[in-house]
Amino acid sequence: MAMDDDIRKGIVEVVGLDLGDKRSQLCVLDRDCGEVLEEGTVPTTREALERRFSTVRPMRIALEAGTHSPWVSQLLEGLGHDVIVANPRRLRLIYTNRRKNDRVDARYLAQVARLDPRLLAPIRHRGEEARAALALLRSRDVLVRTRTKLINHVRGMVKSVGGRLPGCSAGAFGTKKMADELPALVKEALLPVLEVIDDLSGKIRAYDRRIERLAEESPVAGHLMAIRGVGPLTALAFVLTLEDPDRFPKSRSVGAYLGLAPGSDQSGDANPQKRITKEGDAFVRRLLINSAHYILGPFGEDCDLRRYGLKIAARGGKNAKKRAAVAVARKLAVVMHCLWVTGEVYDPLYNTRRSTATKTVTEA
């Protein structure tokens, strides 16, 4: 099938392109016999790649997903080439090679792309608008994590001299509330840190306002926010990361896509219980787990998700609450995708009502 597509597209050469920060290694193979036609490097710049690939016949070009792969793949596709972006998690052939180097990596990419591109588990990069909006969300996340580290540093330093700062939210922690609470011994050292925290909090609030506006402009994000515990940040990150809900034939696939499904290592009769794979987008996975903690927490509303999680937590055992949160996060991803695809209004107790109705009909 791949050969037929190549003939139809006029492709006679297959290229493996191992992207580097400054220079990229390439290997060109003959599609029919697999002979190496060319090996070399090319600068990882738009101008250099355009010069190299704009004057040649259409090629099948395989490259590994990474920092430069979004713009490089977009550029090469614009030049008329068939581009395959390989999933790095699936390229064990490269990562387990004891003589790994850029030249070998480029050759392996080309050889696998020539034989069967499906072995590269191709991924599809998001559009430019989605990437720009996600950059906004991720930048906010970096500032939040940086602020948390600074707050922990201040509290730790105060404890190290026998003091203790009063509890408050991260947004309220700063010079105004904490300056007078600092012990004299460390006050001079920590006041500049409090000023940096003030600045970070102001920038985070500005990000929050922009994210709220983006969520209001997205009908899908607004629809998903009907779930109590899913705010603008989580809804928007979910929509931008998945981008196209039709990529998934079943809503259940979304949990596995985001790394929230247990891994498997079955061999014969042995089928050990594994932890979640943690594949996919770690940022969205973390947001979904945070939402799950809210749903299971004291302020969560009575809903199917909460009942499901509490039932798992009630089994007890080591890390029962953690397992419950992960299970609710996985179920939450499925529910959000289902609502996105169907456009149905969120009913917190949909499954409970349906089971009650079924039980009533059966008894009648």
Image: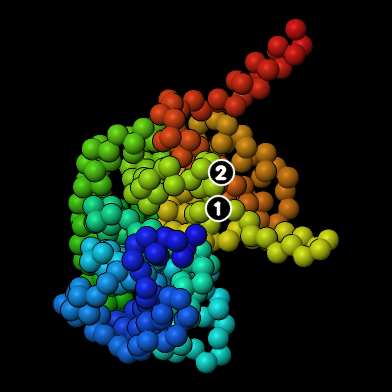
Amino acid type, mark 1: Ala
Q: Residue furthest top?
A: 364
> What is the C-alpha distance between the residues marked 1 and 2?
7 Å
- Is residue 313 left or right of 292 when viewed as pictured? right
Image position, residue 349 (x, y; %): 55, 25
Task: Tell me what residue is drawn at x 52 percent, y 80 percent.
Answer: 95
- Above or below, 58 against 247 in this view is below
- Please, what secondary structure does the residue beneath circle 2 have? helix
Residue 269, can we see it? yes
Q: Do the CB atoms of the residues marked 1 and 2 lie less than 8 Å apart?
A: yes
Q: Nearer the viewer, residue 12 or 125?
A: 12
Image position, residue 145 (x, y; %): 36, 63
Task: Tell me what residue is drawn at x 51 percent, y 63 percent.
Answer: 118
Image position, residue 213 (x, y; %): 22, 41
In the rendered image, which residue does mark 2 sit on? 252
- Above or below, 22 against 6 in this view is below
- Give the crowd class for mark 2: few <14, some 14-19, many >=20 residues within 10 Å: some
Task: Tell me what residue is drawn at x 42 percent, y 60 percent.
Answer: 5
- Please, what secondary structure does the residue beneath circle 1 have? helix
In the rendered image, which residue does mark 1 sit on? 256
Image position, residue 82 (x, y; %): 34, 65
